Amino acid sequence: ALFSHNGSKVHELDIAFDYKDTHAILVDAWIRFSIQHNVEVFVLALRTHYVDDVEKWSSGTRYKLPSSLFNCSSIKGLHLKFCDLHLPASVQLCSLKVLCLDCIELSEDMVRRLTTNCPLLEALILGSCNMHSDLNIAIANRNVKSLEICELQGSGDATVIEICAPHLHSIGFYLCLARELYVVKDVSSLVTASFSFVSDEFDLNHVYDEDDCEHYLELLMDFCHVKQLRICKYLVQVLSIGEVQKRFGLLPFNGTSLELETALTKWELPGICYLLKCSANLGRLDIKYAALTMEMMLSDDFKDAFAFEEKEFWESEKFDFTSIFKNLKHVSVYFLSGMEKNDIVAELCALKELVLKYIVLPKDMIRHLTTNCPMLEDLTLYSCNKISDLIIDIANPNLKSLDIFEFYETKADTTIKICAPNLQSLGFHCYLPRAWYLIKDALSLGTASISFESESINLDFVYDEDDCDDHLVQLLHDLCHVKQLIICRYLIQLSDDFKDTFAFEEKKFWESKKCYLAPVLQNLKHISIYFVSGTEQNDNVAAVMEKLENKIEFAGFILKNTKALKKMVVICGRNTGSVCHNFELLFKITEKLTALPRASTRATLEFI
C-alpha cells in the first residue's frame, strides 16, 4: 500500500516495530520512498531488547542509517530511535526544525555537526543517548532555543554529560539524573531551567553521602542565572536532606520566578525553606501539589538525629524572610486543608496575585485576606468550599480581577455570593455546579467570562426554552452591564437530529469564517493554546494526536492569518500526566506546530 502511493509528497511517515538485522532491506526501501516523496516528518522508532547489554549496545547490530537521509531538504521533523548513526561528510537538513534522538550513540562532535548543519533547527530532544559513554552536547546554532534531556535510571552511571550551548533559552532534565557528572560550560542566554524527575519509590538513602548530595547542588549552581527555575518533588527532597544537615551554603539564585512541585509533607519543608532562602529577587512563586508524592523513606536513625516539629517548622525558622518576600507579587499554592486568619503572612505587603486552591474559607476570610494585602490585584479561587457556601466579599479597591474554578464534585445545594464593587474582571471556569450564584455588587465590572472545559456536557436540556437552567440564566442576567462577555464550552453532547439539522464541514470551518474574522485577527499579538487532551496513560501517540487535530488546525489558522502576531504560547499537557514525560508525543506536537506557515515574520512559538 505504501509503495503504491502516487503523490509527489508525503507529510509524515511513522515507522515503529521490533527490529532485527533481516529487516534492514525493508527499512532502506521505506527511507528511499520517504526521500523521493519529499517527506516532512520522518519517525523511525525501532525497538530492541538489548538496552542494558553494553556489548550488544556497541556491536553495531542496530539499523545503520543511510547517508541520503541527512541530505533530505524536505524534512522538518526527524525522530530516530535505536539506530546506528554515522554522519556523512556532508549534512544538509536545511528545513529541519525539530530533532529527536532516542537511544542513539553519538560521537564527540556529532551534536555540534548536526545542529550546525540544520540552520532552522529550533528544538533538540535527547533521550537516553550514549547510555554507556560520555555525551558531549555542543550547540553553536543561534536558532536552537530548546534542549530536553531525558534519561533512565541505571544508564550512564560512571559517565559525563558536557553542555555548551550559549544561545539556548530553555533546558529541561527529565526522568532522572543518571550521570556521575554534569559539566555545564556555557548556557549564558538561558531563561528557563526545569528539573522533573520520576521515581516509583522515594528511598533517598543513596544521597546521605555528602558527595552524592552535592552532585545535585552543583548542577543547580550552573543554572542560578536563569529567570525561571522549576524544581520537582524529588529534588526538593534531596535538598531537604542537605538542609537539615547544614551541608552547604545558599545558592546565588538570581531569578525572579520559582516553581516547586511538592505535597508540603514534613521532610519536604526544609528543602522548600532552603530554596526560598536562595531566592533574594523572587517576584513569582508557584507551589504545585504533587499528588503522587509519598513520605520519604528515611531511616529511623536519620529522623532521630535531625528531628524537628512539623507544625512549628516555619515559626521556628530564624531566617528573616521579609527581605525575600519584599518583591513577591504573585503566589500560587495548592492547599489541602482549611486556612485560619492567623495563617496570613504579614510580610506579603507587595503581593499582587493570589491563588487559593482546595481551601475551606470561613465566612469573612476573603474579606480579611484581601483587605490585608493592599497591593493585591488578582485573586483566583480553585475548588474552594466544595461542600459549603462561598462568600466572596472584597472591599479592597485595588483588586480588579477574580477567577473562580469549580468542578462536578462541588455540592449542588450551595451558594456563591459575590460583593466586589471595584472588580473589573470576573471569570467562571470549568463548571457551574452550585444551585445559586448571587452577585450583589459588581457595578465596576468590565469583563466577564464563563468557560466550561468539562470533557462531556449534555446540552439537550437547552433545546426547549422552558428547560433552560435558571441559575445560568440568572447569572448571565447579572452580568449584562459588562463591556466584554466571554463564553465557551468544550466537547458537548448533542442529539443526532440536532447535528443533522445544523450540519457543517468540520475541517473547513475556520477557512469558511476567514472573511468574518479578519477584522478581529488584524490586531492579535499574543495567543495561548492549551494542548490538554483527556487521554489515558496507555493511549498511543497516534490516538492522542488525533484528539489534538482541531487544536493544531486552529493554531495553523491563527498563524496563517495574523500579521501582527508576536508570540503563540503552547502549553503541553494531559489530564493524567505531563506531555513532557511522553517523549514521542512532545516531539510530534512540537514538529507539527513549528512546521505551520506564519503570516507574521516576528511570530515566535514558545512551548511550556
Image (spheres, grey):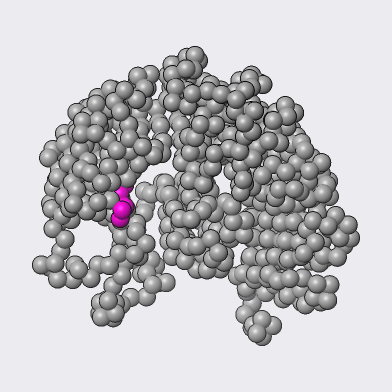
Q: Quadrant of the N terminus?
A: bottom right
Q: Nearer the viewer, residue 83 or 20?
A: 20
Q: Is residue 408 magenta?
A: yes
Given residues 391 and 541, the one toward you in this image is 391
Which residue: 17% across, 41% down?
Answer: 417
The answer to whether any part of residue 20 appears in the image is yes
Left or right: where does residue 417 sit relative to residue 46? left
Quarter of the image for residue 349 reads: top left
Quadrant in the rendering for residue 196:
top right
Residue at 76 percent across and 65 percent down: it is: 48
**On screen, 190 above or below 431?**
above
Compared across the picture, whether 121 is left or right of 290 comes to right
Q: On screen, 81 above or below 349?
A: below
Q: Which stretch did the figure color magenta? A: 403-409
Please give the name of the residue rendered at 28% of the width and 46% of the height, measured from the top-left corner.
Answer: 386
Describe residue 223's horizontal placement relative to residue 281 as left or right.
Answer: right
Where residue 29 sits: x, y (%)?
A: 77, 77
- Residue at the image point whose x is 61% and y is 20% from the top: 250
Q: Is residue 197 above or below residue 100?
A: above
Residue 68 image position (x, y, % from top left): 79, 66
Q: Is residue 486 visible?
A: no
